[in-house]
Amino acid sequence: MGVYFYYFCVSLLAILGRREASSFQPTRPLFSLSSTAIAALSPRQLQFWEDVDEGIDDVAKYYETEDMVRVRDFCSRAKGELPLPEPLGEGHLPSEEHVDGLTARAFWDVAEDPDKFPWARKLEEHSKVIIEEFEEVLVGQRQASGDGIFAGDSAWQSKVMGGGWSAVRLQRLGVWNVENCRMFPRTYNLLRELDIPFAVRGVCFARQAPGSGVAPHSDGRNFILTSHLGLRVPEGCWIKSGNEERTWEEGKLTTLDTSFEHSTGNPTDGERHVLIIDFWHPDLTEAERAGLEFVYDLRNKFESGRVPFRQPRGNKRKNGDEEEKGLAGLWMTLTGSK
């Protein structure tokens, strides 16, 4: 749910300079339209947006499409050049990280729509594989260490999700956690075989402790949907998105758009466990997915220092021997290849 988004945005703010990171709250929009104009961005931030613009150009060329308007508008809105998006329903709280024209729905019944979500019903049909492996690992780890697989990951997450929520990440920001995936080989193999269109946020097992809940918040980004596969769900647990409240079912998917305000509760005396999967909104084209993935992948490389600094070019490519060569040129810069 919202925990990956929060920490992703905190580091994103350091690159884009839109607001002090400490002031960001996950229930509020990521960027303030009045805080910064593109002319006030630092050279490093201008470099980022220049590389984004050129990368999107290259994505469009690769897919032989001119229809990247929504991704370009996404970038313009993130820079404060377009107004904030309007809510598209009760409880809808979109942020500047918004793609126009996508269907807005608090809950999605993905298993009932095989045309848009061909993997969903198959995942439910094979959910026993995941449930059995999860229970085996959970019991084994608790016998070995007492607290089990969730023990080491809950402190920082509780800042956003509350002290009762913790997770074991299998994938985050497009990168699979090799150590954790080794604990769940059958789950990992099944997820990969289903060809799920994983988005930038991640895949994780999530635990909700007895008597706890996640406070209402919005993740802001409307171009990612989130499915929860019920693994262990005591009767009485609930999840609310927009103005609708549902529960989880073991072996079934509960899917929501987390740009709607959402919250959860476990008023029981047992733990609730789900597998969380973030995936691209079905209204996005393949080229748009690639464009958005490029933006966030580049953000990660900027944040980690893997993109060397250069002075902004004023959106003009270099000439002569130093001429940029699209995505290939960017990868040479990132990797140090010749």
Image (cartoon, grey):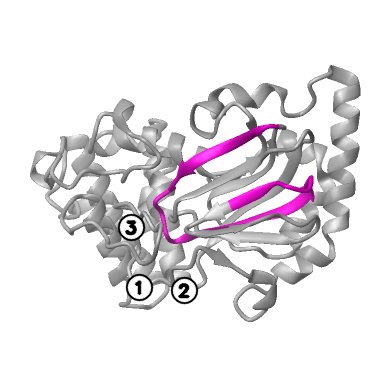
Q: Nearer the viewer, mark 1 or mark 3?
A: 1
- The spot of residue 212 in percent (x, y) is 64, 33
- Left or right: residue 334 compared with residue 129: left
Q: Specify the segment rendered in magenta.
A: 211-239
Report, in whole angstroms, how far the alpha carbon at label 2 lies from the one at label 1. 8 Å
**What residue does disc 2 label?**
283
* Label 1 crowd bin: few (<14), some (14–19), many (20+), radius 10 Å: few
Mark 2 lies on a secondary structure that is: loop
Q: Amino acid at mark 3?
A: Gly
230 magenta-colored: yes
Where residue 55 is drawn, which disc sits there?
Answer: 3
| Disc 2 + disc 1, Cβ < 8 Å | yes
Report, in whole angstroms, how far the alpha carbon at label 2 lies from the one at label 3. 22 Å
Q: Amino acid at mark 2?
A: Asp
Q: Is residue 235 visible?
A: yes
Mark 1 lies on a secondary structure that is: loop
- The spot of residue 173 in percent (x, y) is 53, 45
Q: Of marks 1 and 3, which one's residue comes earlier in the chain? A: 3
Question: Is 225 above or below relative to 65?
Answer: above
Question: Is 58 above or below relative to 183?
Answer: below
Q: Residue 9 lies in what quarter of the image?
A: top left
**What residue does disc 1 label?**
101
Q: Residue 110 lies in what quarter of the image?
A: bottom right
Q: Quadrant of the C terminus?
A: top left
Q: Of marks 2 and 1, which one's residue comes earlier in the chain? A: 1
Q: Please give the name of the residue rendered at 62% of the width and 26% of the height, measured from the top-left corner.
A: 154
Q: Of marks 2 and 3, which one's residue comes earlier in the chain? A: 3
Q: Please give the name of the residue rendered at 35% of the width and 70% of the height, measured from the top-left corner.
A: 60
Mark 3 lies on a secondary structure that is: helix
Q: Is residue 174 visible?
A: no
In this orientation, which residue lies closer to the viewer: 146 or 63?
146
